[in-house]
Image: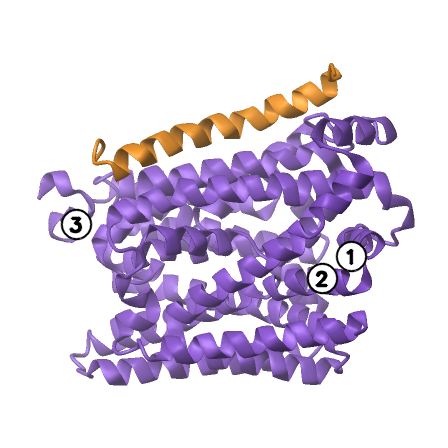
Amino acid sequence: MTATTTGAVVFGLYLVAIIALGLIAARYQKTEADFWVAGRRFGLGVLVMANMAAVMHGGAILSGIAFTGTFGGVAILPYISFVGGAAIIFYLFAKKLRQSGGFTIPDYMGDRFDSRGLRAWSAVVVAVSSTVYLIAQLRGMAFILERLLGFDFMSSLVLGTVIFVVYVALGGLLAVVWTNIAQFLFMWVGLLILVPYVYDAVGGWSSVLQQVEAIAPGWTSPTGTQWSGWYMVSWYLIWLVAYSTRLELVTKMYAAKDDRIARASVPIAIGLVMLFLLYGNFYLGAAARIMVWDQLASADQAYPVLVTQLLSPVLAAVALTGIASAAMSTTDSLLLVSGSAIAHDLVRRCHDEPKGIERDEKDYLKISRLAIVVVGVVAFVCAIPDLALILRIVSFAIAIVGSAFFFPLLVGMTSRRVSREAALASSIGGTLITCVWIFGALTNATWASIVHPGIVGLVTAGLLMLVVTLVTPPVEDRAINKYFSEAT
Amino acid sequence: MILGLPVLSFWLLLGIPAIILLYMLYDCWRILTGRKD
């Protein structure tokens, strides 16, 4: 069997398996809570795996090896951001989010600040940012299918989108988590196959680090081969905020059995992710730098070239297919997050409930599924043209989400004093300034190149939160008591 | 084998997140065993 045939067969089996998981998960869907938060049934093991899959995906391995191979030791910095972001979720967000009993971040924004306007605004930010990100993910996935299965781009896009929409619409969060775990294990297989071969070729950790330092001086230094101090600091801050407001991770807290499980799942998952990256990025990145760097047209090819050079064609196909399937794991989470913002936050909480419209849970389940299909179709249509602009906007998506939610989450969870008006001003003002700065960056304006849009947005959001809180009254106790149990 | 200074600083920088993580895992153990609310 050739490498291409093996890849196609393995990938075909994988696609059949995820549809089957979607069909099984569909049998557990009775209410809206089953669909969006899997009935809050997740124990520690499942939630740890779900958290890991929310943070890691196959793209993290491909781009991680390329990034680490190129820049070296500076790639340790994401570890600090990772752990810092996880600490914020662990100590400040997880318990209160789970105890509040909501489904989504717009639920938190609306309940904590007692504001329908803030709920609607948050839902729009979540829906738009997730859908834009989804468009880029669908295109990336179509390229992977194109290469693996030999289909043309359009057929790959249709196939990929239909599969995602079908299993997410059928099984909701339960299907997403089950398939993410399957993708994650598959990715591990792809990586572990390499271990003995890389060890044979370049030796263990110390040996690899000394060899790579010899051929790329500075690789093992904390600043890596070419980064400036200021660039590192702003990068670190952006990612700290990005990890602590990562929608796919934060909303998983709602699905835990109780708040202890929600909290405990965070450090365990992050610890495992760090071990994973230490091997998957640093060891393999350094090995790639030593062994194949001269042969690469671009750094992104580091992993595929390493695999092709070290493994037999069939094993190489399995390793690449494992990574490729996991590269798709972000897509379903984004579809779910975007769908929940529309069906749960906008339709149910912002439209139906204020108007006294009563529907039963079966109707809301149908609306939820319809929202997934609508988001899928919109993202599919937008993914057809080759819009480089979308890919550039996506690179700033974390800045928009961070500016909109970081301070309302951080301050709203820790202070009773903060006001509704302050949260509105912070979230809307921070997001708008970030968007203006992104527009400047996209049009290559000189003023926009001085600092990352996310930093400007965060500073604006923080200042607005502080100043407006000082001149407006706090939210009524009735609304905030569930976030401050000592007062109840 | 004695590691050179750059390699040593690599491990030292890795130590910062490792220490924070270990502290979180300690708290995690206290939460799961009911020693911490």
Q: Do we see residue A463 in this rendering?
A: no
Q: Residues within 10 Å of mark 1 (few under 14, many from 20)?
A: some
Chain shown in purple: A
Residue A253 versus residue A376 in the image, above or below: above
Instruction: Tell which subunit mark 2 falls on.
Output: A
Residue linked to disc 3:
A482
Q: Secondary structure at mark 1?
A: helix
Alpha-carbon distance for marks 3 and 2?
48 Å
Residue linked to disc 2:
A320
Q: Amino acid at mark 2?
A: Leu
Q: Residue A145: horizontal and vertical position, in percent?
A: 69, 74
Tags 3 and 1 touching, CB below 8 Å:
no
**Residue A229 appears left or right of A1:** left
**Residue A398 appears left or right of A219:** left
Task: Give the foreground label among 3 and 2.
Answer: 2
Q: Amino acid at mark 1?
A: Pro
Of the pair A475 and A326, the residue shown nearer to us = A326
Q: Residues within 10 Å of mark 2 (few under 14, many from 20)?
A: many
Displayed quadrant of residue A392: bottom right
Q: Residue A28: horizontal and vertical position, in percent?
A: 30, 76
Tags 2 and 1 touching, CB below 8 Å:
yes
Mark 3 or 1, nearer chain start = 1
Residue A354 versus residue A222 in the image, above or below: below
| Mark seen at residue A193 | none
Of the pair A225 and A487, the residue shown nearer to us = A225
**Residue A282 appears left or right of A330:** right
Chain shown in orange: B
Tell me the quadrant of the picture where the C terminus of chain A can be found: top left
Q: Residue A461: horizontal and vertical position, in percent?
A: 43, 45
Residue linked to disc 1:
A304
Q: Residue A442: horizontal and vertical position, in percent?
A: 68, 57
Q: Do we see residue B3 in this rendering?
A: yes
